[in-house]
Image (cartoon, rainbow, N blue to C red):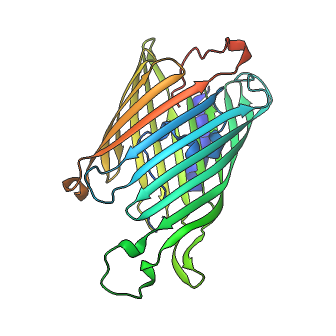
Amino acid sequence: MKQYNFYLIFALILTLLSSVKLNAQQDPMYTQYMYNTISVNPAYAGSKEALSIVGLAREQWIGMPGRPRTQTLTIHTPIHSPSSGFGNEGSDMGLGLSVINDKLGNYHQTMVFADYAYSIQTTDYARLAFGLKVGVNILQANLTDLNHQQGGDPAIYNVDNKVLPNVGVGLYYYSDQGYVGLSVPKLLQNDITADVNTLLGKELRHYFLIAGYVFEVNYNLKFKPSFLIKAVEGAPLSIDLTGNFFIKDKLGLGLAYRNGDAVSGLLQYYFTPQFRIGYSYDYTLSELHNVNSGTHELMLGYDFNFNEYSNTRIHSPRFF
């Protein structure tokens, strides 16, 4: 893949992102975001030549009451000539499903979204995908359980299974070595209400920019730098910077930094090119480090390869 193609696409996406106004972040965060791309970018669906399943559990700020807890399950697969791969002209499609269960104190949201992607061949080794995400966010907020000093405040109403439909879009440019993507997983800024007359808040639009590249240092060692930038109105820009080394396509070791929030260590192990496990630990850098013992995140992934030309096996792992 020619690197200047990535630079051109990346410059265009940065230009688009620069027009975004920076209320607080509502969508969950992940340290292992590079293995959870479809949860934020529908254009990622079908980008692997396999049916891919990834489960991720995040336990944030251990020891802190009401701490964030998130579980994610994503499934996606190519459809329409799934064996085309790189180096073939034409187009391809992908389908995906994302289920996210997120809890913070008395606030609980369950997001279920279907994903569709359509990709076109741009060079011999790269594709550009356009994605659409459609689904619902189901909200619960047991605010009356909180201790409060004064009655009659609208903020202490409960929200019981509030269903908020939404739609999102994404772009994803990728080869067998690298990727860059821009997405808005929830375009609609739905009102969050306890009843028809009580407005408690609003779903805010989040913008995600993600990119990474795999460099082959030598036959037994690869280096993959990556980043994720998240922007939402009213909150500081969130930036994740990550560097992973992969040894003999088996063991991955990495470090990450999230601005103003945490430093992280990452560990991945590929039992086979299809089956992998990942773990990360975040050490909190903010004042919250005095009241928690860090954040744990566990990832499990498996790729079912249905490519008729590969004898049903994946010969080398994909690191994104």
User: Left or right: 170 with respect to 228?
Assistant: right
Examine the image and state in which quarter residue 64 appears: bottom left
Q: Which of 268 and 75 is in front in this view?
A: 75
Q: Residue at x 47, y 25 (%)?
A: 276
User: Left or right: 42 with respect to 319?
Assistant: right
Q: Nearer the viewer, residue 266 or 5?
A: 266
Q: Which of 210 and 16 is in front in this view?
A: 210
Q: Which residue is drawn at 51% across and 30% down?
A: 301
On the image, the x and y values in percent for residue 252 come to 39, 25
Q: Nearer the viewer, residue 135 or 150?
A: 150
Q: Is residue 21 visible?
A: no
Taking 258 as reference, is 82 above or below it?
A: above
On the image, the x and y values in percent for residue 278 come to 41, 31
User: Left or right: 105 with respect to 81?
Assistant: left
Q: Which residue is drawn at 45% across and 11% down?
A: 219
Q: Which residue appears farthest toward the left when viewing the image?
A: 290
Taking 235 as reference, is 90 above or below it?
A: above
Q: Can residue 319 be seen in this view?
A: yes
Q: Which residue is drawn at 63% across and 43% down?
A: 97
Number of labels in the image equals 0
On the image, the x and y values in percent for residue 291 come to 21, 56
Examine the image and state in which quarter residue 173 appears: top right
In which quadrant is the N terminus drawn?
Answer: top right
On the image, the x and y values in percent for residue 209 come to 53, 48
